[in-house]
Image (cartoon, rainbow, N blue to C red):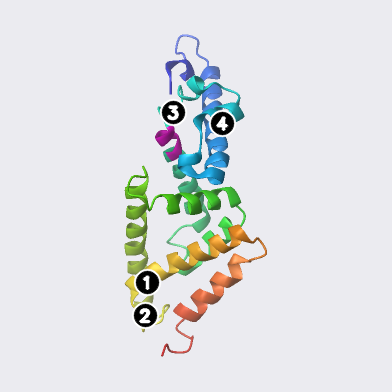
Amino acid sequence: MGTDDRPSGGRGSRGPYVTGQARRQAIVDEALAVFSRTGFHGGSLREIAKRVGVTPAGLLHHFADKEELFAEVLRQRDEAVRAAAGDPAEHTLIEQAKRVVAHNQTSRGLTSLYAIVSAEATDPEHPSHADFAARYRVRADEAAEILRRGQEAGEVRADIAPEHAARLISAVMDGIQLQWLLDESVDMVPLFEEFVTRYLDPAAPPRP
C-alpha cells in the first residue's frame, strides 16, 4: 500500500486509509472475475484496472505486480473455504468436506478460479506451481491423519488406506466441481455425499 493510503497522524483522519482499502478490495474483486474467466496467464492487469476505474499505474500503487494480486485473490479464496468448512473441533473431516462442496456450489467464481488455475499450475513454469503442489500434498497429509483418528474412533471404515482415501476425497471433489462448472444441472452435494457414505462409512458393505 502506498503512503497516500495510510492515515495521517497529523490530520487524525482515517478517510484516505479507508478509501485505499476499499479500492484495494475492489481490485481484488475484479481480479477474481477476470482470473476465474481467463486464468492467470490470460488475465490482464489493464483489463482489471479498467473494470475498477483506475489506470494500470494506479493499480500497481496497491499491488506490486500480477503475481502479488493473484496471491491475494487466492488467499481470500482460501479464507472463504476455511470459513465454510467450519471449526475442525466441531466437524469431522467428512462433514467439513461436505460443507466445502455446498459452499463451492454457491460460489461459481471462486470455484472456477480454482479449477482453472490448478490446471494451469501443472506447468512447472507457472508462478503457483510450487504452491499448488504443496497445498495438495499438505492437505492430503492432514486429511490422512484425520482419517486415521476417525478409524480409531470407529467413524471411518477400517479397510481403507488413509493416504489413498485422502487423495481420493480431493480428486472426487475436484472432478465433481469440474462437471458442475460445465453443466450446472449437476448437483454436487448429493453426489459427494453418496461417495463419502459408500466409501468411508463403517456401515457400508465391505470392499471386495
Q: Residues within 10 Å of mark 3 (few under 14, many from 20)?
A: some
Q: Secondary structure at mark 3?
A: loop
Label 1 sits on a secondary structure element that is: helix
Q: CA distance from mark 3 to mark 1?
A: 40 Å
Residue 74 horizontal/vertical position (percent): 45, 44
Q: Amino acid at mark 4?
A: Glu
4 or 3: mark nearer the eye:
4
Report which residue position mark 3 lands on: 63
| Front label number (2 vs 3) | 3
**The magenta stretch spans which residues?**
66-70
Q: Which residue is mark 4?
A: 47
Give the CA separation, mark 1 to mark 4.
44 Å
Where does the image place residue 105, in percent across and percent down from the top left? 60, 58
The structure residue drawn at horizontal position 49% and vertical position 54%, both measured from the top left corner, is: 115
Question: Which is nearer the eye, 45 or 146?
Answer: 45
Instruction: For the residues labelled 1 and 2, say whether their Cβ atoms are less than 8 Å apart.
Output: yes
Distance of mark 1 from mark 2, alpha carbons? 10 Å
Query: Residue 67 versus residue 164: which sits nearer the camera?
Result: 67
**What is the secondary structure assignment of the residue under circle 2?**
loop
Q: Amino acid at mark 3?
A: Phe
Q: Please rate how many residues cluster around mark 1, counting C-alpha atoms within 10 Å: few if below 14, some from 14 to 19, many from 20.
A: many
Residue 45, placed above or below residue 179: above
